[in-house]
Amino acid sequence: MLRVAAYSFGILCLAICQTLCARADGGTAQPAHPDGKGDIYGTSWGMTLALDGSGFYNEVLGTVLNEMDSPKAYQPLPYKRAKVSFRDIAGSCLFPSDIGHLAAGKDIDGPEGYIQTVPLIWVESHIFSRYGDAPLASLAALEGRKVAYPNGSALPTVLEGYGASFLPTTTETAKARMLIAGRVDHMSGSLPDNIFVFKSLGRPLPPYNPDLALIRVGVSVVCHDTPENRAFVEAFDSTNARLVSSGVMAAVFAGAGVDARFMPKP
């Protein structure tokens, strides 16, 4: 598997991604602290991480928070605002993220002073092909091909030397429409996110090679390392383990149409 240092959680654009405003059962999560200290900030980027609390990532996190005795408040915020709030507010947390990813992207100075929960979702980055074409057998097959990618992603640098040309786009839906219309030969994208993007367009996932992932990373809740947050992470991980072993989390993934391979096992 090719490991890529930069990637988009929003896709996590690699760049890999909110109180759940809406609980999995339709209720509301606990209100945010008045000063925002200790809250979990969600990096909203679209239909799977919506500001109104809807979407698959919101549902997965909410499933755990709603089963905790003392859950943290959860605020979905615009992507950049969530990152800045997490950086500036001691005691806060960020979802979905990963300490290594934050450090690599210079969002934090280094891993010291941060802790994280167990991963909740495996996120993969792939190159998708046009309908009717075969999945890529190798990256060498990109020679002479046009690839749509998210503007700001490091993908052109990462895949430099393979002979492809790259067309930037501003949204996941725009990339998908370009591929469907045949304006490009391929598009980069993440899973499970693109399951929902293409479903919204009434199309199945385009062909891709599951063995040719550019990156595979587990996304977690990352927190400033404080005594309160250590207790929260321990309780969160324990609750998640119980939900996984009981089959509750598997039902959440299945209900959303997401394959079980994207569900980390504690």
Image (cartoon, rainbow, N blue to C red):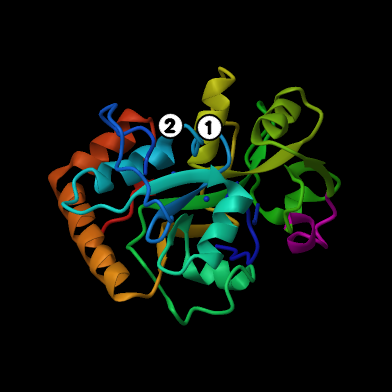
Tell me if 8 is positioned left or right of 60 in this view: right
Given the image, on which type of amino acid does mark 1 rest?
Answer: Met
Number of numbered tags placed on the structure image = 2
Q: Secondary structure at mark 2?
A: loop
158 versus 239 height, above or below: below
Q: State the residue position of label 2.
A: 54
Q: Residue at x 52, y 39 (%)?
A: 193
Q: Which mark is residue 39?
A: none
Residue sitting farthest toward the top: 202
Q: In the rendered view of the protein, which quadrant contains the C terminus?
A: bottom left
Q: Residue 145, how many percent across, how many down? A: 82, 43
State whether residue 158 is above or below residue 121: below
Lower position in the chain sequence, tag 2 or tag 1: 1
Residue pictured at 30% horizontal, 33% vertical? 28
Mark 2 belongs to which amino acid? Answer: Ser
Secondary structure state at the residue bearing disc 1:
loop
Residue 221 quadrant: bottom left
Residue 156 within the magenta-colored segment of the rendering: yes
Front one among 160 and 139: 160
- Pick the front one: 53 or 60: 53
Q: Are marks 2 and 1 in contact (CB under 8 Å)?
A: yes
Secondary structure predominantly adopted by residues drawn in magenta? loop
Residue 17 versus residue 250: which sits nearer the camera? 17
User: Which stretch is magenta?
Assistant: 155-164
Q: Is residue 10 left or right of residue 39?
A: right
In the image: residue 207, left or right of residue 56: right
- Characterize the local packing of mark 1: few (<14), some (14-19) or many (20 or more) Cα atoms within 10 angstroms: some
Res. 11 visible in picture: no
Q: Which residue is mark 1?
A: 47
Q: Residue 84 at what x, y percent from top left?
A: 59, 59
Query: Is residue 52 placed above or below 163 in the rendered structure?
Result: above
- In the rendered image, residue 112, in percent from the top left (x then y), is placed at 47, 82
